[in-house]
Amino acid sequence: MTEFEFLSVLISIIFGLGLTHVLAGSVRYVFARRATEAQLVYSLFVLLVLVLNWWVIFTWRDHANWSFDEFLVLIFWAFSHYLLAITLYPPDESFTAFELHRSWFLWSFAGMTLMDIAQTAMRGDLFDPWYYLIFVLHYTAISSAATFIKSPAVHRAISWWLLFSIVVWSIVVRRFST
């Protein structure tokens, strides 16, 4: 087993747990009639982020000389994705309103974007494509600013923007930039 295979198995488990948590949380909240539109749209967004970044780990396959620093950054990068899933649907079964813990979700998303920048920089692709950093930092800015906004209408708009932008990034931009 190569070092990449060893690491990718652990990251795959973490991403798989995140996917499972979002899918199970979505279903639980829909059946309990507790999910808001924004929460469901955020769920689709997080599912796409998890799948996209699970695919991104494959870009490390040709990396030859692994260091413990790289290992740690990639593990914490994967953990940040799992944390995003957990904060979207907290593990307690009380079905608290998403608005009560939305700021946890948004702050974890901001943290995840910073970890994404770290792993991309470590891979040497921070400016490939040249607008990657601008794109990810716009997510950091939106999620950080949104923690202070209380309006459900604004959060619906933000959730739809995040979903739309990640779909365009995943299907259009990444296809033609590589």
Image: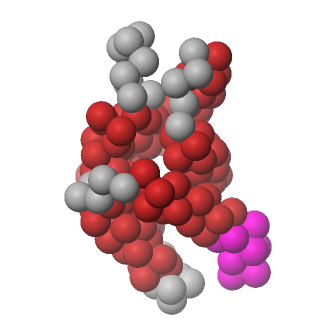
Q: Quadrant of residue 143?
A: bottom left
**Residue at image coords 52%, 62%:** 157
Q: Position of residue 85 (x, y in %)?
A: 46, 35
- The residue positioned farthest toward the top in the image shown: 93
- In this rendering, position of residue 130 left or right of residue 137: right
Please identify the quadrant where the N terminus is shown. Answer: top right
Does the magenta portion include 133? no
Looking at the image, which is closer to me, 121 or 105? Answer: 105
Q: Position of residue 76 (x, y in %)?
A: 32, 44
Asked if residue 171 can be seen in this view, the reply is yes
Span highlighted in magenta in the image = 168-178
**Residue at image coords 41%, 10%:** 93
**Residue at image coords 32%, 71%:** 141
- The residue positioned farthest toward the bottom in the image shown: 130
Q: Is residue 129 above or below residue 48?
A: below
Please identify the quadrant where the C terminus is shown. Answer: bottom right
Asked if residue 72 can be seen in this view, the reply is no
- In this rendering, position of residue 151 left or right of residue 53: left
Does the magenta portion include 173? yes
Looking at the image, which is closer to me, 6 or 134? Answer: 134
Tell me which secondary structure the magenta stretch mostly adopts. Answer: helix
Looking at the image, which is closer to me, 134 or 94? Answer: 94
- In this rendering, position of residue 27 left or right of residue 101: right
- The residue positioned farthest toward the left in the image shown: 148
Q: Quadrant of residue 20?
A: top right
Looking at the image, which is closer to me, 106 or 34? Answer: 34
**Residue at image coords 43%, 82%:** 134
Q: Position of residue 10 (x, y in %)?
A: 48, 31
